[in-house]
């Protein structure tokens, strides 16, 4: 057990002592990271026969900046919705990252790969600039000066309802967005932090247009709460309650199979399920009762997955 995590979680229950403060999430404070993540999702969408020209995109858990969504807009999308539980992003950082992203697209920069971001997934077979998706005609229109200026100007006001960039914090209600109004919903290492997975997937289903799709990289690891990557499944619900404390989010501890089950129940067709496999020091019998009854041999060695699925009915 990570004693430090336990002490910190317990401390958050004490009024005025070590209370939770929103901190940076890492990753999206880098323009090259945001560029890499967006293009990876786009390349994987092409590989799986999905729409690589989404007009309206939505992101769950953007983190320190809106950079991934801004990359989507720069590459030709018309509107970007962003939903988070805790506000991390700010306009000054977003504008700086936006300017760097524009330069990367104008230079047709290669996708930053494993040498620069070894832990970023999904992994690709190659990291050349995807000119087959973002061809010269598309980039000519997308990078037109007046269009770029328009996007840059609205970054400072992402709370306006009519803006092409909308940042909603906090969000808990599916009614925050119109039904069947979005072409693509994506996230990067976020869904493992969502407490109510069922309602979140239900919301995504409602928001998507018919044949719209989701694209999610999910990390099932313990995120430093245990010594082993899957040690968080050994903790009882009571111990986990103490570790989490009053933090607004930590981990939902749901395994890979939970996501697949919900997706199928909600009417999605899974087109891609790219699993990351890791060795497990534990057997199923070592896990807390909650998990030993539900996790299978596949789950206990699945430390991550990239999932793309389309709304079909």
Image: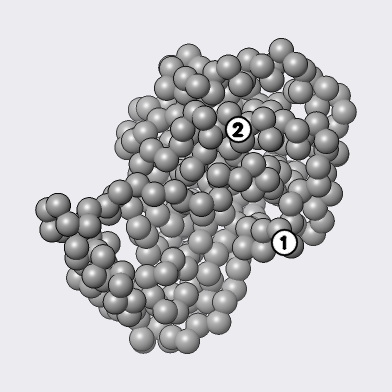
Q: Residues within 10 Å of mark 2 (few under 14, many from 20)?
A: some
* Residue depicted at x 58% and y 23%: 79
Instruction: Give the Cα separation between the discs numbered 1 and 2.
Output: 24 Å
Instruction: Specify the quadrant of the image occupied by residue 126.
Output: bottom right
Marked residue nearer the N-terminal end (1 or 2): 2
Q: In front: mark 1 or mark 2? A: 2
Looking at the picture, tell me which residue is in the foreground, 268 or 172.
172
Looking at the picture, tell me which residue is in the foreground, 40 or 224.
224
Q: Residues within 10 Å of mark 1 (few under 14, many from 20)?
A: few
Q: Secondary structure at mark 2?
A: helix
Instruction: Give the image location of residue 63, x and y in percent.
Output: 47, 44
Whether residue 91 appears in this view of the structure is yes
* Residue depicted at x 63% and y 15%: 150
Instruction: Give the image location of residue 57, x and y in percent.
Output: 57, 32
Q: Which residue is mark 1?
A: 114
Q: Is residue 173 above or below residue 302?
A: above
Q: Check contact, mark 1 vs mark 2: CB within 8 A.
A: no
Q: State the mark number for residue 96.
A: 2
Q: State the mark number for residue 10.
A: none
Whether residue 233 appears in this view of the structure is no
Q: Is residue 12 left or right of residue 24?
A: left
Q: Secondary structure at mark 1?
A: loop
* Residue depicted at x 49% and y 28%: 91
Q: Is residue 214 above or below residue 9?
A: above
Q: Is residue 128 left or right of residue 37?
A: right
């Amino acid at each position: 057990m990570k004693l430090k995590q336990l002490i910190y979680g317990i401390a958050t229950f004490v009024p005025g002592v070590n209370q939770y403060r929103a901190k940076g999430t890492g990753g999206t404070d880098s323009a090259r990271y945001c560029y890499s993540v967006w293009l990876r999702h786009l390349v994987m969408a092409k590989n799986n026969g999905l729409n690589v020209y989404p007009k309206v995109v939505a992101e769950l858990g953007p983190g320190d900046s809106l950079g991934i969504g801004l990359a989507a807009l720069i590459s030709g999308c018309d509107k970007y919705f962003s939903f988070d539980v805790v506000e991390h992003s700010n306009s000054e950082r977003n504008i700086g990252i936006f300017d760097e992203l524009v330069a990367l697209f104008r230079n047709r920069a290669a996708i930053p790969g494993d040498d620069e971001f070894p832990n970023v997934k999904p992994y690709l077979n190659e990291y050349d600039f995807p000119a087959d998706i973002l061809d010269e005609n598309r980039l000519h229109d997308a990078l037109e000066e007046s269009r770029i200026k328009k996007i840059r100007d609205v970054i400072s006001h992402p709370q306006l309802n009519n803006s092409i960039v909308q940042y909603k914090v906090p969000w808990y209600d599916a009614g925050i967005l119109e039904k069947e109004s979005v072409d693509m919903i994506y996230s990067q290492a976020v869904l493992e932090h969502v407490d109510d997975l069922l309602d979140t997937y239900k919301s995504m289903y409602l928001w998507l247009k018919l044949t719209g799709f989701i694209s999610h990289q999910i990390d099932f690891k313990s995120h430093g709460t245990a010594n082993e990557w899957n040690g968080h499944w050994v903790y009882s619900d009571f111990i986990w309650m103490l570790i989490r404390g009053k933090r607004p989010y930590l981990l939902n501890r749901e395994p890979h199979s939970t996501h697949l089950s919900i997706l199928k129940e909600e009417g999605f067709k899974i087109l891609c399920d790219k699993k990351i496999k890791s060795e497990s020091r534990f057997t199923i019998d070592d896990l807390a009762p909650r998990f030993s009854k539900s996790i299978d041999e596949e789950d206990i060695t699945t430390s991550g997955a990239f999932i793309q699925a389309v709304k079909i009915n």
